[in-house]
Amino acid sequence: MFTFNTFQKSLAVSLLVLFFTGCNQQEFYEKEFLEGVGVPDDAIELPDEPKIVDNTTGGSTGGSTDGSSTTGGSTSGGTTDGGSTSGGTTDGGSTSGGTTDGGSTSGGTTDGGSTSGGTTDGGSTSGGTTDGGSTTGGSTDGGSTTGGSTDGGSTTGGSTDGGSTTGGSTDGGSTTGGSTDGGSTTGGSTDGGSTTGGTTDGGDPGVCGDGTLTNASDTFIQNTSQNAAVDILWVMDNSGSMGDEQAALAYNFDVFIRDFISRDIDFQMAITTTDGRDGRSGNMIGDTAKLTDEAARANQTQFLQDFKDMIKVGTRGSGTEMGLQTSKDFFSQYQSWARRDAYLIVVYISDEQDSSPDAVSSYVAALQGLKAQSGMVKAYSIVTQDIDPNKQWETLGTRYEDVSNATGGEVANIHSDFYATLTNFGFKILELLDSFPLSGVPIDTDIQITINGVQVSNGWVYDPQARVIKFDRSAIPNEGSIVIAYYKKCVAP
């Protein structure tokens, strides 16, 4: 049997080593590459490249780098993808003065663009450009710049998208004098337009907000021979919780009405409820003929008793109170009840929030539309202004308050003493009868009054709560005098 001795074994191994080392390494590499087709990159193991630390100046001659070719050398000072470079090239682009993709550069370009003076994509730059835009003086995409421009717009003097600028422009618009979208400007412009000496969106809206400041005037003819007249509609909550309040109002009613009677005021009253259900909304309670000054003069005791009986409207009404809607429906049903030349007072009494379907402003407009002079309509409210912990059903009556405030009326807390509340309400209404109501709301106290064309500065006062002009007893205009009030007011857009 043929056997190898030690020498022969060594010789065979040496020959095998020489055979394999004589093979072309490139064949193995090409085979491994072909076998890797369709395999994810991270699953392919390529031969390790020697790690080279480039600390040279002058680099290589006649060589190439991974992914791009160079004639005469790839680097002077050298860079790799993602690093910083002075005098080299970046991934996919050509450079004189060098930058990398995503890094910071002095004297180069960014990914996909050419630059003389250099910036990076999304970074900060001195003397370059941003992604997609050209600049002299430099800026970044979305950043702040002095002497540059923002994404999509050109600027001399510089600004950023959404920031504040002096001497620049905003996204999409050109400006001389500078402003930004949504900022405040002195001598600037708004988004998309040009302005000299203007303001921008979001600046100081002025005293009228979105409205317009307007000159206004109201004209009155003094008629002392005719007694002042007033119509009063009581809108009483008739839900299950209101029995005590109805009784309190009835008991203290005489302090409200006695001065009307003693001064021979021309008045009439009516009553409805807050029940807004179909067939009930705005219905008149009782006989309104029994609630007039004529009825009081004829039999004051009976007059007082009739009112006390009628104002106790009961507590079986809807728990969804809609006083604003029912008052509107009342005047729709009884259009002739409100007299043309009389003041109109609507008094709301409720311990819960109004749940009428429309906006408060629409109900204010409906009430004021009943008079040629809107200042002759006032809403008074006795409502919940603070929650009693023992009355968990109560809710704040803010919608009633809003109507009162919009018409220059009065508001009282339903938890307050009805004697004091009704005394004050009666006094305020009587004051109106000797006053001149303004149709608008003056923006300040700069009001001018003329009587027959002559301005008068003394002898009168303006009541900002009631929005009326009231003359002193010694300065009341003569019969037939023409009184004009001049003022400034805001008009809604």
Image (spheres, rainbow, N blue to C red):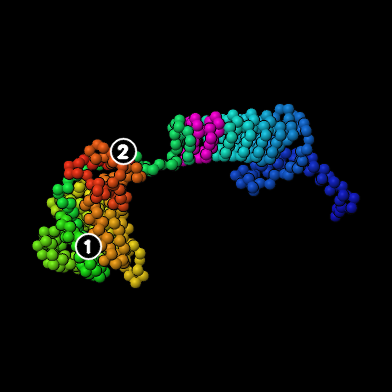
Q: Position of residue 468 (x, y in %)?
A: 27, 48
The segment highlighted magenta reads 155-182
Front-lying residue, 320 or 486: 486
Residue at x-position 15% and y-position 55%: 266
Q: Position of residue 288 (x, y in %)?
A: 13, 60
Residue type, mark 1 in image? Phe
Residue under label 1, please give it: 256
Front-lying residue, 79 or 165: 165
Query: Foreground mark, 2 or 1?
Result: 1
Q: Position of residue 27 (x, y in %)?
A: 71, 39
Quick check: can you spot residue 310? Answer: no
**Circle 2 residues within 10 Å: few <14, some 14–19, many ≥20:** few
Q: Which quarter of the figure is the C terminus placed in?
A: top left
Quick check: can you spot residue 20? Answer: yes
Q: Which quarter of the figure is the N terminus placed in?
A: bottom right
Front-lying residue, 354 or 8: 354
